[in-house]
Structures are given as C-alpha cells and as structure tokens.
Image (cartoon, helix red, strand yellow):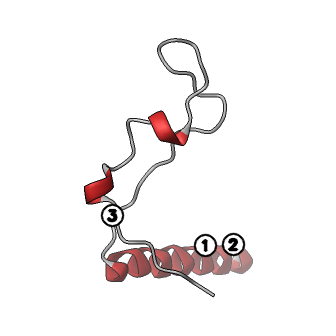
Amino acid sequence: MSLLLLTIAVLALAMTGMAVGVILSNRALRGSCGGIAVRGPDGEPMTCGNCNCRLPEDEAPAETSRS
C-alpha cells in the first residue's frame, strides 16, 4: 500500500512540476494537426501548409536558433 501511495505522490509531483513550467514559460498550449491520417474536405491529406490551425505569418512567434 505504501508503494502505491509513493507512486501516486511521485506522479503528482511530476505533473505539478510540468504545470508550473508551462505557467512560468508564459506560452499557450497548442494542439497538433492530427498527423498524416487527417484529410481535408476534398479528401486529400492535409499538410502543414494548408492546416487551418496554423497562426498567420504575422502572428507566428519568432524562431530562435539553437546550436
């Protein structure tokens, strides 16, 4: 029983840490377009270029280069 409670406590602590990290990063969560199985209204596979979930170019966050 104590192992179960320890496991729940560790998972709760990890989830709390991730939530605090998201809050402190001050960025909104975004979903994905759903992968390669998503089809558009014409039956063609959707690509990132024609996804309606994308931000317009003028609202897109600035890309930072990581090396």
Tell whether label 2 touches label 1 (CB within 8 Å).
Answer: yes
- Crowding at mark 2 (Cα within 10 Å: few <14, some 14-19, many 20+): few
Foreground pick, 16 / 52: 52
**Mark 2 vs mark 3: which is more N-terminal?**
2
Q: Indicate the position of residue 42 as horizontal and vertical percent values.
A: 51, 12
- Residue name at image x 33 percent, y 76 percent: 23
- Residue name at image x 69 percent, y 80 percent: 2
Please tell me whether mark 3 or mark 1 is closer to you in this view.
3
Determine whether 51 is above or below 12 in the image: above
Using the numbered discs, state the Cα–Cα distance from disc 2 to disc 3 in whole angstroms: 33 Å
Amino acid marked by disc 1: Ile
**Mark 3 vs mark 1: which is more N-terminal?**
1
Please tell me whether mark 1 or mark 2 is closer to you in this view.
1
Q: Which residue is mark 1?
A: 8
Which residue extends farthest left?
58
Tell whether label 1 touches label 3 (CB within 8 Å).
Answer: no
Which residue extends farthest top?
42
| Rendered-image quadrant of the N terminus | bottom right
